[in-house]
Image (cartoon, helix red, strand yellow):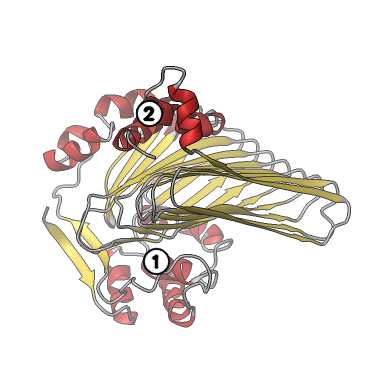
């Protein structure tokens, strides 16, 4: 693939200025980028969790734009090599038109295709790359941008603020329910590139939307970096379903920051299926006001030398708030590891609030551990955590084999059955795809044990 522009090297104000100029952004956004750069240099990698010291920031491509002229406006106009990539992943023209309310496809730093159903646009729904929305809806973006995930939040949120490109903006007006999913697909394609998309979702009062993002990358010799930021604003009595299907190649560092602000009576569902990556650190979070609800569900499928450090965070700042965090790990191989991290803050005044959390792992080989933490300042509240590890050992295999199941089928039954209840949270059109990807991996483990 040919590239129109690739920006590598030292991360400094000059490089930030080039990204800002290429994207033709409003001036207020440059101020955020420079603040992000400042805090990226100040902040250090976490002193807990996986080792991130191998990330070489001087070798990363911070902006990479494929050369596609003219930009496609119809599926038929996409270059054949890009269509082939998406078709292999099941994103055919027929699939987009039949099952999705809208689709945005991004290669490396740049969106390459967008389609939105006309009836959604007639209702005032906006679904487009954020890098374009900052020009078309500058005032609206500025109102919400970086308000719940600040450039000072962590090193990788700061990095994203400094160099982000592409991404997604969703706006749903008051009293509008989007009845079919919006879908974005992000692909890393260039050697040692960083993908830094940023997603901003604003759902007004009494409205609803389901958004699905898919991620993948080919196997490259150098380790790419994915450091996204997601901000979701769920207004009064609104609802957002946010589903991530992550299948990066096994050498990607996956370090996103995702957070929702949920107003009175609103609800956010974070659902994450983590299959790929070298190291993933993912803790979707939510800030809850009166009567607000957050449900965080995650599945991590760790194979040889994969490290998943996942879980969720909740900040209860209102009466009658409700939260669920359910983190599931499948640990397949020696050298693989799943760590569950739960952080819950029940602040003073959050009367009659309740949080239930669960950390479960199916251990076949490798390591797993759980770190649930509760910070409680309100006596009139309830919280509970369950941590559990199930071991799939020779005794269990013998039990299943004695009933006529060969080892490969026994493994498939055990793994798929372990997270079947969580898959029920995923729209039907994605369940089969998740099972298919998992089954392909399971086939390689027919002689486990």
At horizontal 50% and vertical 32% (from top left) the residue drawn is 396
Q: Which mark is residue 407?
A: 2
Binning the other alpha carbons within 10 Å of mark 1 as few (below 14), some (14 to 19) or many (20 upward) gives: some
Say whether marks 1 and 2 touch (CB < 8 Å): no
Question: Which type of secondary structure does the marked residue at label 1 adopt?
Answer: loop
- x, y percent for residue 296: 59, 44
Binning the other alpha carbons within 10 Å of mark 2 as few (below 14), some (14 to 19) or many (20 upward) gives: some
- x, y percent for residue 75: 21, 34
Residue furthest right as drawn? 380
Q: Is residue 54 above or below residue 82?
A: below
* Depth order, front residue of 51/282: 51
Q: Which mark is residue 26?
A: 1
* Depth order, front residue of 61/30: 61
At horizontal 44% and vertical 52% (from top left) the residue drawn is 366
At horizontal 55% and vertical 31% (from top left) the residue drawn is 425
Question: Which type of secondary structure does the marked residue at label 2 adopt?
Answer: helix
Res. 288 visible in picture: yes
In the rendered view, does 356 fall on the left or right side of 169? right
Q: Which mark is residue 238?
A: none
- Count how many numbered circles sit on residues in the image: 2
Rendered-image quadrant of the C terminus: top left
Residue furthest top as drawn? 404
- x, y percent for residue 81: 13, 42
Of the residues under marks 1 and 2, which one precedes in the sequence? 1
At horizontal 48% and vertical 54% (from top left) the residue drawn is 367
């Amino acid at each position: 693939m040919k590239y129109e522009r690739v920006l590598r090297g030292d991360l400094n104000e000059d490089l930030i200025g080039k990204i800002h100029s290429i994207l033709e952004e409003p001036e207020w956004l440059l101020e955020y980028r420079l603040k992000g750069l400042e805090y990226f240099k100040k902040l250090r990698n976490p002193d807990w969790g996986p080792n991130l010291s191998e990330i070489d920031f001087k070798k990363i491509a911070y902006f990479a734009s494929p050369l596609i002229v003219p930009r496609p406006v119809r599926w038929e106009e996409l270059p054949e090599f890009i269509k082939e990539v998406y078709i292999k992943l099941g994103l055919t023209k027929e699939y987009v038109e039949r099952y999705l309310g809208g689709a945005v496809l991004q290669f490396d730093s740049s969106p390459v295709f967008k389609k939105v159903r006309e009836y959604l646009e007639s209702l005032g729904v906006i679904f487009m790359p954020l890098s374009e929305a900052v020009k078309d809806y500058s005032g609206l973006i500025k109102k919400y941008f970086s308000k719940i995930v600040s450039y000072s939040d962590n090193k990788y949120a700061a990095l994203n603020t400094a160099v982000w490109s592409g991404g997604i903006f969703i706006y749903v007006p008051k009293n509008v329910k989007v009845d079919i999913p919006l879908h974005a697909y992000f692909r890393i394609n260039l050697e040692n590139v960083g993908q830094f998309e940023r997603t901003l979702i604003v759902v007004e009062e009494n409205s609803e939307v389901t958004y699905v993002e898919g991620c993948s990358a080919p196997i490259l010799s150098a380790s790419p970096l994915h450091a996204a930021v997601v901000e979701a604003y769920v207004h009064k009595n609104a609802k957002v379903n946010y589903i991530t299907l992550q299948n990066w190649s096994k050498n990607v560092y996956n370090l996103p920051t995702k957070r929702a602000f949920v107003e009175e009576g609103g609800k956010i569902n974070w659902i994450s299926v983590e299959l790929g990556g070298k190291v993933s650190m993912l803790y979707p979070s939510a800030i809850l006001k009166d009567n607000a609800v957050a449900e965080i569900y995650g599945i991590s499928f760790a194979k040889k030398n994969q490290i998943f450090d996942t879980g969720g965070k909740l900040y209860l700042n209102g009466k009658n708030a409700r939260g669920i965090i359910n983190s599931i790990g499948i640990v397949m191989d020696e050298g693989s590891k799943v760590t569950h991290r739960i952080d819950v803050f029940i602040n003073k005044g959050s009367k009659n609030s309740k949080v239930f959390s669960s950390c479960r792992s199916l251990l076949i080989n490798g390591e797993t551990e759980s770190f649930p933490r509760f910070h409680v300042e309100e006596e009139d509240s309830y919280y509970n955590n369950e941590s559990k590890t199930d071991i799939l050992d020779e005794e269990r295999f013998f039990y299943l084999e004695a009933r006529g199941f060969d080892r490969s089928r026994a493994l498939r039954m055990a793994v798929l059955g372990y997270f079947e209840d969580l898959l029920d949270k995923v729209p039907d059109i994605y369940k089969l795809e998740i099972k298919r990807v998992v089954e392909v991996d399971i086939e390689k483990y027919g002689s486990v044990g």
